[in-house]
Image (tube, rainbow, N blue to C red):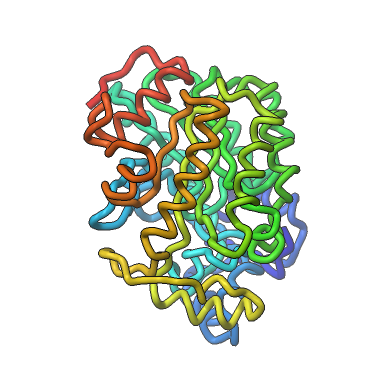
């Protein structure tokens, strides 16, 4: 992680976690009492989305750490729970919604971990089955090795038997995971794409084969795995390349150890388009065949999405018919035409229960209340 400066909220300046960050990163730092001057300096820059990736703000999370997935209206949601450990990302993907989601975007990492674990303990005490992840507003592993939060989280989840933690990444920052006691309550997952998309649209991320090698190592450490194809980008020759990625997955890991594979096509809020055009001038992804969806996001025409989904699902089922494949933010028609059923027609009755059941099978959960 290459930073130009670290700003430290006065409230967290004396924490040992803060000292660990400063020692590991070794770059100029300043203690501040408020965030406004920092935000103003980024907002006034010519390219706020780029400027925000060079500055880190260590601070408290003033709100709840545990949040419900924001999802989107009119499309099927999986009822994921977000563990909000920080915001924004040091990697730089052209399609990233975080460029437009935060105003202005800035790397933040929350240091008040005592509150975080109090919220988790309260959640665990309910004995309800929750799927919880840290990879919604940031990448789960970019903070390695500056922080030991991942180790604390993995071990906290290992001591309970009703919920699972999912760490989602595009990095290969897995070196420390070998030594963690996880008790199969943590899923290691990778966002995948074709090498063409990785090279053209995913700056500073790990190459495809490096991600798959990291997944294989994590499998050897005993972790269950998951993979996410989101966003799928439609371009000439993409079908062949996405099918090749699927074949490569099974060259590296066992299908029996994959908890789920998700798919979602490229979609974006209209305000993201000019940001992509300005910051990624060689990118062609916003010039596809799009229509405004029911949620106000631009999406590929439905027949184009279904065509790609069907081909990918067919190959996965051919290799391993029992792997749970699901769609992120698609409607019943897409499910029916691509998978042959809608979530309500599945034996589990809904997408959240489908995911819960797969977690139960792969993560050795044995003391929970399923809603």
Tell me the quadrant of the picture where the C terminus can be found. top left
Choose between 64 and 341: the one closer to the eye.
341
Residue situated in front as seen by the camera: 230 or 317: 317
In the displayed structure, 66 sits above or below 8; it is above
Q: Is residue 236 left or right of residue 299?
A: right
Residue 207 position in % (x across, y down):
73, 50
Residue 91 visible in the snapshot:
no
Rendered residue at 45%/52% (across/down)? 307
Q: For residue 291, say whether it is visible.
A: yes
State the image quarter where residue 213 is shown: top right
Image quarter in which the N terminus is found: bottom right
Is 223 positioned to the left or the right of 185 in the image? right
Depth check, front residue: 209 or 247: 247
**Front residue of this view, candidates 346 and 310:** 310
Q: Is residue 311 above or below residue 32?
A: above
Q: Position of residue 42 (x, y in %)?
A: 56, 79
**Quarter where residue 342 is shown:** top left
At x 47%, y 61%, the residue is: 266
From the top left corner, tell me how far across and down residue 118 is, in percent. 38, 34
Please tell me which residue is depicted at 51% across the width and 76% down the height of the picture.
287
Residue 294 at what x, y percent from top left? Answer: 26, 64
Would residue 27 appear left or right of 119 to someone viewing this image?
A: right
Please give the name of the residue rendered at 69% of the width and 59% of the height, measured from the top-left corner: 196
The answer to whether residue 183 is above or below residue 12 is: above
């Amino acid at each position: 992680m290459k930073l130009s400066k670290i700003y430290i909220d006065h409230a967290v300046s004396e924490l040992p976690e803060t000292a660990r960050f400063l020692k590991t990163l070794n770059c100029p730092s300043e203690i501040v009492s408020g965030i406004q001057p920092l935000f103003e300096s980024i907002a006034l820059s010519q390219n706020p989305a780029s400027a925000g990736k060079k500055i880190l703000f260590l601070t408290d999370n003033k709100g709840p750490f545990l949040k419900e997935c924001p999802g989107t209206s009119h499309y099927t949601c999986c009822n994921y729970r977000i563990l909000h450990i920080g915001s924004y990302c040091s990697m730089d993907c052209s399609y990233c919604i975080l460029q437009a989601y935060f105003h202005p975007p800035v790397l933040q990492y929350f240091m008040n971990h005592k509150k975080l674990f109090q919220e988790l303990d309260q959640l665990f005490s309910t004995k309800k089955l929750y799927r919880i992840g840290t990879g919604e507003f940031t990448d789960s592993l970019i903070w390695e090795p500056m922080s030991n939060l991942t180790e604390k989280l993995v071990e906290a989840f290992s001591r309970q038997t009703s919920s699972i933690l999912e760490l989602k990444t595009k990095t290969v920052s897995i070196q420390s995971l070998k030594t963690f006691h996880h008790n199969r309550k943590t899923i290691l997952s990778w966002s995948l794409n074709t090498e063409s998309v990785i090279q053209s649209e995913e700056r500073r991320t790990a190459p495809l084969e490096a991600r798959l090698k990291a997944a294989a190592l994590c499998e050897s450490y005993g972790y269950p795995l998951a993979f996410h194809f989101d966003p799928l980008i439609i371009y000439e020759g993409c079908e062949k390349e996405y099918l090749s990625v699927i074949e490569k997955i099974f060259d590296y890991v066992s299908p029996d150890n994959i908890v789920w594979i998700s798919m979602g096509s490229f979609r974006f809020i209209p305000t993201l388009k000019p940001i992509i055009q300005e910051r990624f001038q060689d990118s062609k992804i916003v010039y596809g065949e799009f229509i405004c969806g029911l949620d106000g996001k631009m999406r590929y025409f439905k027949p184009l999405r279904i065509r790609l989904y069907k081909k990918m699902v067919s190959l996965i089922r051919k290799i391993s018919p029992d792997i749970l494949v699901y769609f992120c933010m698609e409607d019943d028609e897409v499910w029916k035409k691509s998978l042959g059923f809608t979530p309500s027609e599945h034996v589990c009755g809904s997408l959240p229960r489908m995911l819960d059941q797969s977690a139960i099978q792969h993560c050795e959960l044995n003391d929970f209340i399923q809603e």
